[in-house]
Image (cartoon, rainbow, N blue to C red):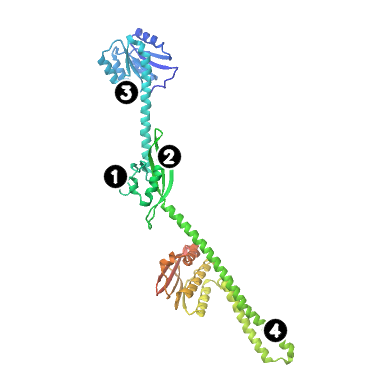
C-alpha cells in the first residue's frame, strides 16, 4: 500500500530498459513542483525485488522490455499492490494495446513524445488511487459496522426495530409473536401494539424524527389480568446529517413494575398496620384506665370505706364494747373484696402481657386463656396440644399466643359461633396451629382482598420464621385458619 502523498515527496519506481529514455523521463520529472525520488530498474528481476524491498507512490513502466512487458508488470502490480498507481510510458503503442493495458489495471499511458503530460498523469493517477482506496476503506468500515450491529442486535435481550417515522418496520433482530423477521419487515409496528398506546407511540415517533432527538418513556398494556409494562427507547438514525429512520427498543419491565407495585402495596399495608396497632394500643389504654377507675377504684374505695367503718365503730364503742359480730362480718366482707381486687389487678396485668407466658411458658398460657374464654363466653372452645419436646423461644411464644388470643377474640365478636377449637401440634417436621369455628363463615377471597389487617397482621407476626397461612371459610359452616412453621426455622 503506498504511503500518503505529501507536498514534499513522491517515491517513484521507474521500469525502463534504456538508460537514455530513463534520463529523459527523470529530466522531465525535475520540472515537477513536487520533489520526486526515483528508483530506476532495468528488468523484471530488479523490478520485483524493488517492490518487495520498498513502498512507492507510483510506478512508471515502458511497455516493450526484454523478456518482460508492461502488460505483465501491470498485472503483477494489480495482483500484489492493489492501490499502487501504474502508468505506461512508451515510445509507441497502438490503441488496442493501450485499451488492454487500461483494462489490466494501468491508470494511464503516456507517449514518450508527449512527456509534458507525464506529471499531470502522475498526479491524477495518485489522486484517483487515493480516492479509490478511501472508498474501499469506507465500504469495509460500513460492512464491519453492519456486521457489528447485527451481532449486537441479534444477541441483545430486547427486540430491536428499525422503523420509519410512520412505524413501518425496516429491520427487526428476531422473530416476534410467532411471526418471522421476513414477515414483519414491511408491516407497521403499530399493528403489534395494544390500542391505548398506539397514538402515544406515533406521537413519539414523529417528535423523535422531526427533532432528531432520543426519547424514553413507559407504556402499559391494556390487559387487566396480565398487564405488561414496557420501557421504550427511540433514537434517530442519521444519514448526511438528516434523519433517515428510527431505532425503537421496547424492553419488558413487567417484573420490575409488579415488584414496585407490590412494595408500594406492602408499604401501605405496613402503614395501616402501624396505625391499627396505635389505635389498638390507645383503645387498650382507654379500657385499662376505665377498669382501673371504675372497677379497681370502686373496689379500693370499698376497702377504704369498710376499714373506715371499723375505725369509727371502735372509736364510738371502744374495743371492749364493739359489736364483735358486726365487726367480723365487715372484716369478712373486706377479705372477699380484697381477694376480688387482687384478681382484678392480675387480670389487668395479664391483659397488658400474660405473666404466665414469661413464668411457665406458651402451653400453660394458652391453656389459661382458653379456660378464661370458656368461662366468660357462650362459645365453647376445645384445646388440643401435642408439641412433644418442642422448645419455644420468647418471640415465637408471644407470636403464637397473640395469634390465638386475637383469633378467639374475633370468633367471639364476629363469628356467632357456638363451638370453636384450637390445636397446636407437631406433624411432618412442621409446627401446626389450627383455629376453627362453626360460625357464619368467612369469604376467603374477600378476606384476602379486603382492607382488614387480620390476615396481614398474622403474616407479619410469622415473617421471622417464614410461617405459612391458609384461610378457608364457607358461609354457614364456619372458618378455619391453618398455620404451619418448619421446625428448621424454629431451631435456627
Tell me the tag on residue 211.
2
Image position of 358 (left or right of 143)? right
| Label 4 packing within 10 angstroms: few (<14), some (14-19), many (20+) | few
> Which residue ends up furthest to the left in the rendered image?
96
| Front tag of 1 and 4 | 1
Mark with earlier residue (4, 2): 2
Residue pointed to by mark 1: 183
| Front tag of 4 and 2 | 2
| Label 2 packing within 10 angstroms: few (<14), some (14-19), many (20+) | few
Q: Is residue 375 above or below residue 401?
A: below
Image point 41% across, 41% down: which residue? 208
Front in this rendered view, residue 150 or 67:
150
Secondary structure under tag 3 reads: helix
| Front tag of 3 and 1 | 1
Image position of 228 (left or right of 385)? left
Mark with earlier residue (2, 3): 3
Q: CA distance from mark 3 to mark 1?
A: 44 Å
Q: Is residue 132 above or below residue 456?
A: above
Q: Quadrant of residue 305?
A: bottom right
Amino acid at each position: 500500500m503506498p504511503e500518503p502523498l505529501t507536498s514534499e515527496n513522491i517515491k517513484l519506481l521507474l521500469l525502463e530498459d534504456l538508460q537514455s529514455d530513463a534520463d529523459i523521463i527523470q529530466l522531465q520529472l525535475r520540472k515537477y513542483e513536487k520533489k520526486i525520488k526515483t528508483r530506476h530498474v532495468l528488468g523484471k528481476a530488479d523490478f520485483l525485488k524493488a517492490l518487495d524491498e520498498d513502498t512507492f507512490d507510483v510506478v512508471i513502466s515502458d511497455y516493450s522490455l526484454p523478456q518482460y512487458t508492461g502488460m505483465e508488470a501491470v498485472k503483477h502490480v494489480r495482483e500484489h499492490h492493489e492501490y499502487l498507481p501504474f502508468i505506461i510510458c512508451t515510445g509507441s503503442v497502438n490503441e488496442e494495446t493501450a485499451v488492454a493495458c487500461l483494462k489490466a489495471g494501468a491508470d494511464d499511458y503516456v507517449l514518450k513524445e508527449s512527456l509534458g503530460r507525464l506529471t499531470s498523469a502522475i498526479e491524477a493517477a495518485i489522486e484517483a488511487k487515493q480516492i479509490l482506496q478511501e472508498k474501499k476503506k469506507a465500504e469495509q468500515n460500513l460492512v464491519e459496522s453492519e456486521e457489528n450491529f447485527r451481532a449486537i442486535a441479534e444477541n441483545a435481550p430486547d427486540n430491536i426495530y428499525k422503523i420509519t417515522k410512520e412505524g413501518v418496520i425496516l429491520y427487526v433482530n428476531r422473530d416476534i409473536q410467532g411471526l418471522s423477521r421476513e414477515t414483519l419487515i414491511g408491516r407497521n409496528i403499530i399493528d403489534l401494539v395494544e390500542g391505548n398506546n398506539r397514538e402515544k407511540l406515533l406521537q413519539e415517533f414523529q417528535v423523535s424524527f422531526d427533532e432528531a432527538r432520543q426519547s424514553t418513556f413507559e407504556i402499559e398494556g391494556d390487559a387487566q389480568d396480565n398487564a405488561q409494562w414496557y420501557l421504550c427507547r427511540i433514537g434517530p438514525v442519521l444519514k448526511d446529517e438528516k434523519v433517515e429512520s428510527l431505532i425503537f427498543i421496547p424492553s419488558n419491565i413487567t417484573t420490575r413494575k409488579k415488584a414496585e407495585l407490590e412494595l408500594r402495596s406492602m408499604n401501605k399495608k405496613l402503614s395501616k398496620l402501624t396505625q391499627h396497632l396505635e389505635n389498638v394500643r390507645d383503645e387498650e389504654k382507654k379500657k385499662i384506665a376505665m377498669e382501673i377507675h371504675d372497677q379497681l377504684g370502686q373496689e379500693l374505695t370499698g376497702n377504704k370505706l369498710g376499714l373506715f367503718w371499723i375505725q369509727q365503730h371502735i372509736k364510738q364503742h371502744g374495743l371492749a364494747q364493739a359489736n364483735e359480730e358486726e365487726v367480723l362480718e365487715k372484716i369478712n366482707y373486706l377479705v372477699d373484696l380484697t381477694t376480688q381486687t387482687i384478681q382484678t389487678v392480675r387480670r389487668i396485668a395479664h391483659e397488658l402481657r400474660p405473666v404466665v407466658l414469661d413464668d411457665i411458658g406458651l402451653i400453660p398460657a394458652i391453656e389459661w386463656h382458653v379456660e378464661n374464654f370458656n368461662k366468660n363466653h357462650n362459645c365453647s372452645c376445645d384445646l388440643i396440644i401435642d408439641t412433644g419436646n418442642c422448645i419455644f423461644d420468647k418471640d415465637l411464644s408471644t407470636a403464637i399466643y397473640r395469634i390465638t388470643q386475637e383469633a378467639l377474640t374475633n370468633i367471639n365478636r364476629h363469628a356467632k359461633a357456638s363451638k370453636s377449637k384450637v390445636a397446636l401440634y407437631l406433624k411432618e417436621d412442621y409446627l401446626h396451629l389450627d383455629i376453627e369455628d362453626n360460625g357464619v363463615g368467612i369469604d376467603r377471597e374477600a378476606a384476602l382482598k379486603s382492607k382488614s389487617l387480620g390476615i396481614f397482621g398474622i403474616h407479619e407476626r410469622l415473617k421471622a420464621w417464614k410461617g405459612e397461612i391458609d384461610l378457608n371459610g364457607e358461609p354457614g359452616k364456619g372458618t378455619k385458619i391453618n398455620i404451619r412453621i418448619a421446625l428448621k426455622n424454629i431451631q435456627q
